Amino acid sequence: MDLAFETKRVAQGEIPKTGEEVPVTPRRVVTYKASQKVKDRIAKNNVSALDGKSETNPNMTMLDPSSEELPPIPAKRYFTIGEVSELCSVKPHVLRYWEQEFPQLQPVKRRGNRRYYQRHEVELIRTIRRLLYIEGYTISGAGNRLREEKQKSSKG
């Protein structure tokens, strides 16, 4: 194992209540220097930064929020939060948060508060994801944009 010990210099600090200056002794830092064998193994199994695909499995894309490649939505009536999470590349806790922020998103709740999303809600989540992660909207900006689109579709 290649370990390196670094010693940092003593810095001057200040006690907030009294304003007295005191020396702050540094902690000792131990870092691990990876061997070439470890580096080669990481490089072999690593995900290419350019195309976002694993070299060992080219069909597997990273869970990158900015990635526009999403799987097709299957022909089902209801989807669980786990299924929606995979279909939209968004973690379940983010979906729960978005329910609070976007009143348009209201999944059906059954048995013990389990959420069931319909196809139009999955499409709405994908739209929200695109607005936030790809187009760079804030949550309030994305909410305004969704309201504008709804008004346009109801008028026209």
Image (spheres, rainbow, N blue to C red):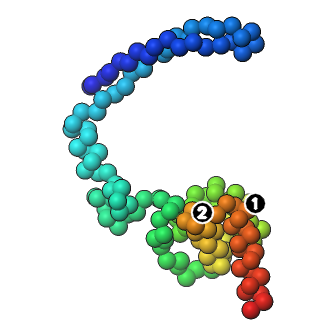
Q: Is residue 9 above or below residue 3?
A: above
Relative to 48, 23 lies left or right: right
Please give the name of the residue rendered at 27% of the width and 48% of the height, measured from the top-left corner: 43
Disc assigned to residue 100: 1
* Location of mark 2 (residue): 136
For the residue carrying disc 1, how many other residues have a C-alpha within 10 Å: few (<14), some (14-19), or many (20+)?
few
Please give the name of the residue rendered at 53% of the width and 14% of the height, measured from the top-left corner: 11
Q: CA distance from mark 2 to mark 1?
A: 20 Å
Of the residues shown, which amino acid type is indicated by label 2?
Answer: Gly
Quadrant where the C terminus is found in the figure? bottom right
Label 2: which secondary element: loop
Please give the name of the residue rendered at 69% of the width and 67% of the height, measured from the top-left corner: 142
90 and 11: which one is in front? 11
Quadrant where the N terminus is found in the figure? top left
Residue 75 place in picture, x, y as percent = 55, 82
* Corner quadrant of residue 111: bottom right
Q: Is residue 99 above or below residue 46?
A: below
Disc assigned to residue 11: none
For the residue carrying disc 2, how many other residues have a C-alpha within 10 Å: few (<14), some (14-19), or many (20+)?
few
Relative to 66, 57 lies left or right: left
Q: Do tag 2 and tag 1 residues touch (Cβ < 8 Å)? A: no
